[in-house]
Amino acid sequence: MQTQRPHALVRFIRYGWVPLLTLLLSACHFDMYNQPKIQTYEPSSFFADGRGSRPNVAGAVAVGKAQTDDYFATGLVDGVEGDRLPVELTRELLERGQAQYNIWCAVCHGEAGFGKSVIAQRGGIVPANFHQQRLREAPIGHLFNVMTVGVYRGDPAQGGYQSMYSYASRVSAEDRWAIAAYIRALQLSQNATPDDVPPDQRGNLGK
Ligand code: HEC
């Protein structure tokens, strides 16, 4: 037996309020929508030049728009990776670099920089080993540049992809140099000879 559809009026009473209520509520603004404000390109009598749209405050830098043409910000000299640490090399810098490295990089590259980590084991990605010959010989500007722009495999316009993301928005330039210096220390730690140890501490070797 076919079930009978309810009468149109019954159906309206049952469900008709849903679209009605939606319509009513969507037109309501109880927030800051209703307040005096300048619309785009509207003139304003508040400012002396009469313009409602204001120029940028002097010295303000929008995210991603920083002046990035000097060595400190890029690690590049005329587009080529430089081999100079543009900050003073101190114990504090290395300790800062170690802390930042352990926060940002060790998850993939491992605490000692061999590229062995839980992520490498499980994630199917191959983070670089910093102790390979090529990276030991790379200028420090390369380490900095990699953190600044990331690593690309091939041209993204031609199906290439980014195999390591940039850290420029998360790690300041100062800290990126600190990390680069610390990676140099990690590299040295795996390739040092007894002569690199200060004479007064050589007695501790092999203990
Ligand atoms: C999410 C994982 C991940 C994190 C976190 C990560 N990396 Fe990497 N990194 C990679 C991978 C993967 C590669 C290899 C990319 C390739 O070979 O295409 C790589 C490569 C590199 C290289 C070698 C580039 C070259 O010339 O081959 C350097 C240097 C490097 N990373 C530094 C860092 C530093 C410093 C940090 C922390 C600020 C960091 N990475 C954080 C995944 C990561």
Image (spheres, grey):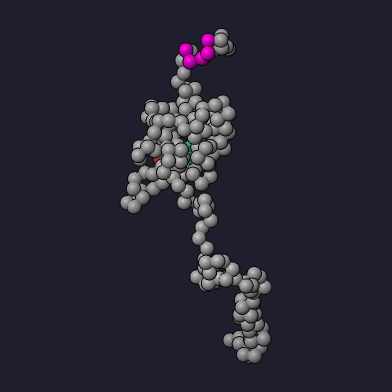
Question: Where's residue 24, x and y in %?
Answer: 64, 80
Q: Nearer the viewer, residue 103 or 40?
A: 40
Q: Quadrant of ligand 1?
A: top left
Secondary structure mainly formed by the magenta segment: helix
Q: The C terminus is located in which quarter?
A: top right
Q: Is residue 206 visible?
A: no
Question: Where's residue 198, x and y in %?
Answer: 52, 13
Residue 12 vs 166, above or below: the answer is: below
Which quadrant of the figure has residue 21? bottom right
Q: Nearer the viewer, residue 118 or 98?
A: 98
Q: Nearer the viewer, residue 138 or 102?
A: 138
Query: What segment is highlighted magenta in the picture?
Result: 195-199
Residue 151 vs 195, above or below: the answer is: below
Q: At x 51% / y 58%, what residue is drawn? A: 56
Question: Where's residue 206, x and y in %?
Answer: 55, 12
Question: Where's residue 16, x and y in %?
Answer: 63, 84
